[in-house]
Image (cartoon, coloured by chain):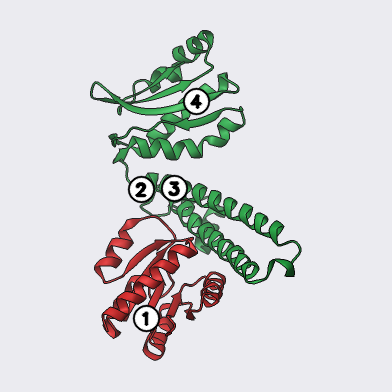
Amino acid sequence: MNLLLNSMKDGKNTVKVNNNINELTFFGKITASMTHEIKNVLAIIQESSGLLEDILDMSESNEFTHKDRFISTLGRIQTQIQRGIDITSNLNSFAHSPDNALAKIDLNELVQNLSLLASRFARLKRVSLVTELSDTPLIVQANSVQLQMDIFSALEMLLQHIENGTIKMIPGKHEDQILLHLHYDLLTTDQFNIISTSDQWQNLTHCDWGRIKLTC
Amino acid sequence: MEELNVLLVDDEQEFVTTLAERLEIRNMNVSVAMDGETALGIVENESPQVIVLDVMMPGLNGLDVLERIKSIDPKIQVILLSGHGSTKDGIKGLKLGAFDFLIKPIDIDELIIKLNEGWKKYCESQ
């Protein structure tokens, strides 16, 4: 480490760190590791609130005036723990995206995961993000990071032009082509024309795995 | 009626001690270990019937500990515990003789069911 710092200070030598992991893999690895830590924290909170509930259950109702209020508050804590677990699990899957450059991916799973990860962006525009998944797996061979970026870019672009309403993400198959259908319930013709003719959207319609289709 | 002897093995101390307290409330005898070596010592001396074993631990990992437990006493039933949803460790663990596999955080009712099933299996193999 000292050698590295001295060399950087001199500015004479270029110090290259010899490793086999690229930036995305590095960020993914660290993020995945942190999600495990967060899950441990959630597990401790869950067991602690569960223990409080056990202790309350052991006491008679007349022994403790505020028993019902405690139980309902513990219920809220449990709900938020479950929310934390869901978010952390999604973040963990996302962090593992760069593990393989090219992988067989079920578009259903990817869309479900991404809808949760992107829900906050939608919520800031008062838009609900929902999914309508296919009954059968929709396997595509793709770069998971790139695929998620494409879908996220489409969502982001759509969100730039809208406020309120619901975006339904519908992965499906049409004539042997796997595609993702984004349906926005309040889309006007003007908005549709702007979005569907933008350069970025045109690129998205030519993804290798299929295409993203916008409808209202 | 005989009480179930459980050993909880996890390097997260707060998790393992709180869970132990919850199981004790439910009339189980519970020992705890924060690492694999300690767990193996308890297996030799206290003869637990069912063990809840974290997969990822510093030093000996859960799968290594599982193999050693099974070589000491194959009757002992081991429930593996993991912080992530990967089934790879679960499948590996089942091949090594684990009784079941749970994902952290765990639901206490589900754990109780698994512990009792493990205990039943232990008694049947006597």
Residue A63 is left or right of residue B70, and the answer is right
Residue B8, position in %: x, y? 45, 75
Q: Which chain is red?
A: B
Rendered residue at 38%/87% (across/down): B47
* Sequence order check, earlier mark of 4 and 3: 3
User: Callout 4: few (<14), some (14-19), or many (20+) C-alpha neighbours within 10 Å?
Assistant: many
Q: Position of residue B7 (x, y in %)?
A: 43, 79
Q: Nearer the viewer, mark 4 or mark 2?
A: 4
Mark 4 belongs to which amino acid? Ile
Label 3 amino acid? Ala
Q: Which residue is mark 4?
A: A167
Judging by the rendered image, the residue that carries numbered circle 1 is: B49
Q: Are marks 4 and 2 on the same chain?
A: yes
What residue does disc 3 label? A95
Q: Residue at x 45, y 14 (%)?
A: A196
Amino acid carrying label 1: it is Gln
| B25 relative to B85, above or below | below
Mark 3, Cα crowd under 10 Å, few <14 / some 14-19 / many 20+, is many
Answer whether residue B54 is visible to the viewer in this image: no
Q: Which chain is green?
A: A
Which of the two discs, 1 and 3, sits closer to the camera? 1
- Evaluate whether label 1 is on the same chain as label 4: no
Q: Chain of mark 2?
A: A
The label nearer to you, 4 versus 3, is: 4
